[in-house]
Image: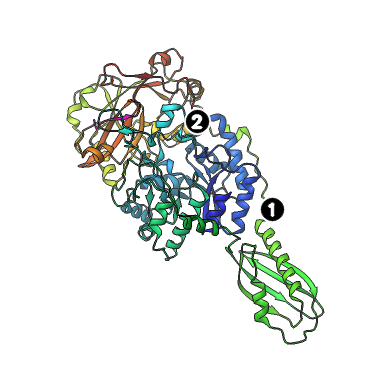
Amino acid sequence: MECLIAAVQNGADAVYFGGGSFNARRGAANFKGGELKEAIDYCRLRGVKTNITLNTLLFDRELKAAVDFAAELLSLRADAVIVQDIGLASILREELPELVLHASTQMGIHSLGGLRFCEENGIARAVLAREVSLNEIRRMHEASPVELEFFCHGALCMGFSGSCLYSSMAGERSGNRGTCAQPCRKNACVYGRRAGENEFALSTNDICMIDELAALREAGIMSFKIEGRMKSPEYVATVTRIYRAALDGEKPASARKDLYMIFNRGEFSTAHINGDSVNTGHVGSAKPTQELIAAAHESVRGDKPRRLVTAELTLDMGEPATLRLKSDGCEAEAEGEVCEAPIKPIDRVRLTEQLKKLGGTPFKLDGCTVSGEGFIPVSALNALRREAAEGLSRALLGEDAPKKPIGEESILRHIRPIGSAEEAPLKYLRVRRPEDVRDADIVGVDPVFPDSFDIGALSGIKAKLVLILPNVLITEGARCAYEKLLGTGAFCGIEINNIGHADMGLGLPLRIAGIGMNAMNGAAFTKLLSMGFTHVMPSPELTRAQLAALAADFGGVMMINTYGRTPLMQLLHCPVKEYRGCRGCRGDAGVLTDGEGRRFPLSNVRFREGYCLVRMLNCAVTDIREAFASSGMRVFACAETPDADPDPAVTRGHWARAVE
C-alpha cells in the first residue's frame, strides 16, 4: 500500500498490482483480502485507474479460481485485468464480457499479427514486448486500433518479453507462474570457461526512456509503464515524480542523475527502440542521497488533490444552507444551518476561498457558484463542506457490483475434448541442419538463416517437411523471409511459437502450436485448435500426471517433446557479440557457462548480417523417451536429432517434478 500511495501521490494516472496467487510477482507483498478493495477504492476516489495482474500461466485446476478472482475484480470495479494465458483470456472474454483485458508483455506481442489477435479476441490494450523498435511501434499503431503500452523504466529481462524457462528448469521456480528465481542475474560468461565472480553475461542494465518519451508518444504509445512492483516506496515516489514532470514538459535538470541514484544496474539503456543499446554485466545498486529520500518522504505527506470538483452553494435567508459538489457525473448535497440575514453584504469571493479548503480530501475546487443573500458562520460553512465532501466520496465509490457467479460447468465448456490419438502416431523429428534430415514420416526444419536456407539440399528426401518459426520475428523483413520459404512449396506444415504468427501458413495441412505458445491447460488447447492449429505442444513445465490428464481430452492433437535440449531463453541481445564481437554464426553461436560450470549451448537464427535471434538451450538434454513409452499416453512424439555432445548431461525436465 505504501508503494501504491507513493505512485498516486506523485502523479501516476494508473497503477498495476497483483492480488492473490495469479500474478507474475508472487514474491511481492501484493494485495490480499480487504486490502484489494482498499487499494482499488483509494485509486478510484482519486481518479486513478487500476490494472490488476492476472498474468501467469495456469494449470487446469486453477482456472476456476482465476475466473472467480476476475469476477471479484469486476465487482470491485477494477479498470482492467492484465493476462498472459490465452486459455484464461478466452474464458474471461466470454464469461465476463464487461471486463477490460490487457495483453501482458509476456504474451510476446511485437508485430501486427499480435495486435490482430488482440483485436479479434477483445483485448483492448497490448503491453508490447520491450524488444520492439520505434519504427515497428509506429507501424503497429498506424495499422491497429489496439491501445499500446510500453515499459519506460525499470528492469529488463534478458529473455525476449520475459518469456523464459531458465528458472523453471534450474530449480522448479517458474517465471511464467510468478516465482522466477532470476538465475540470469547470477554469474555467467561466454568464453568457454566457468564464469568468474564478477562476470554477469546475462544480467542486463535497466531501461530508462526519460529522454525518449516524446518520440514514443509520437510513435503511438499511449501508456508509459514503470516497472516497480518489487521496489521500495522511495523508488516508486522518485521515479513516478520524475516521469510525471517529464510528461508534463517540466523534466528536472537532475532527472537522469536522480533516477540513477535511486536504483540502477550500471548505465541505463533504451532497450531496442533505436537499435540494440542493451549491456550486460551489471548488478543492482542504490545510493540515493538524503535529499532524494527526504523528497520522496515529503511527497506522500497529506493527500494531494487529484479530482476536480465544482460547487454550488445556496444561501437563501430563512432556509437551510445547501452545498452541492459534483465530479465525473456524481454529486452529493449537504444541508446545514438556517441562513440568517447578513449584517453586511455577502463576500462571494471569501466564501469561494473558504470552500477551496478541501485539505485531507482528494478533491480540488474547479469552479464555484454562490446564490442567495443569507449568512452562516464560517464554522457552519466548514461543517457543510466536510459533509458534502464525504458524501461525494461515497457517491464516487458507490456500491460494489454483485459478483457474477461462474460455475464449474462454465469453465468446462471452454475445454472441448478431441479424443484419443491415431493408432500409428506421426514421428516428428526436429533438425537444424539439412544433412540431419531422416526418412521419418515428418521432419521439422529449423533454418538457421532463412534468407539463404538451401531448399535444394532437402530435395529427393521422403520425409514431409515442416518449417519451424522462431519465437520472434521482430521485423517485417524477418517475417517476409519466412513467408518466402513457405512460398517455395517445400513444406507441408508449419510450427508456430508466437501468437502474432498464428496467421502464417494458413491452408497448410499441418499447423503445429509449438511450446512457445505456452499451452498449459485445456482451455489454451481449445483456443489454439479453434484458431486452425492441427496439433499442440504442451508447455514443458507440465508433469507426467498433468500431461496424462490433457492427453485424455486432447490425445489426438497433442505432441510431446521426448528428447532434446529445451530452449530456455530467446535473446535479441547477443552476449557473444557484446563480449567477443560478432562471430558470423550459422546456427552454433557458442556456449554460455555459469558459476557452477554448467554449459548452455547457444543456437542462433540469422535474419540478416549482424542481426540474429540467439536461443539459449538447457545445459542438459531432456530425455523422457523410455518414461513416455511406458506411460500409456496415445499422443504424438517429437524428438530432436542426437545431441552434438556424445555424452550429454540428461534430465527428465518436469516429468516428475512440478513447478511452483
- Residue farthest along the front direction in this orientation: 290
| Res 465 → quadrant | top left
Q: Front-most of 216 and 241?
A: 241
Q: Is residue 12 visible?
A: no
Amino acid identity at mark 1: Glu
Q: Provide the residue span drawn in magenta.
A: 587-594
Q: Main secondary structure of the magenta part?
A: strand
Give the residue number, with chain letter if any, for mark 1: 399
Give the residue number, with chain letter if any, for mark 2: 521
| Res 364 → quadrant | bottom right
Q: Percent position (x, y) of residue 366?
A: 59, 71
Amino acid identity at mark 2: Asn
* Tally of marks: 2
Residue drawn at (40%, 59%), measured in percent from left and top?
255
Q: Is residue 620 visible?
A: yes
| Left or right: residue 256 compared with residue 96 | left
Question: Is 390 one of the magenta-colored residues?
Answer: no
- Mark toward the viewer: 2 or 1: 1
Task: Tell whether label 1 touches label 2 (CB within 8 Å).
Answer: no
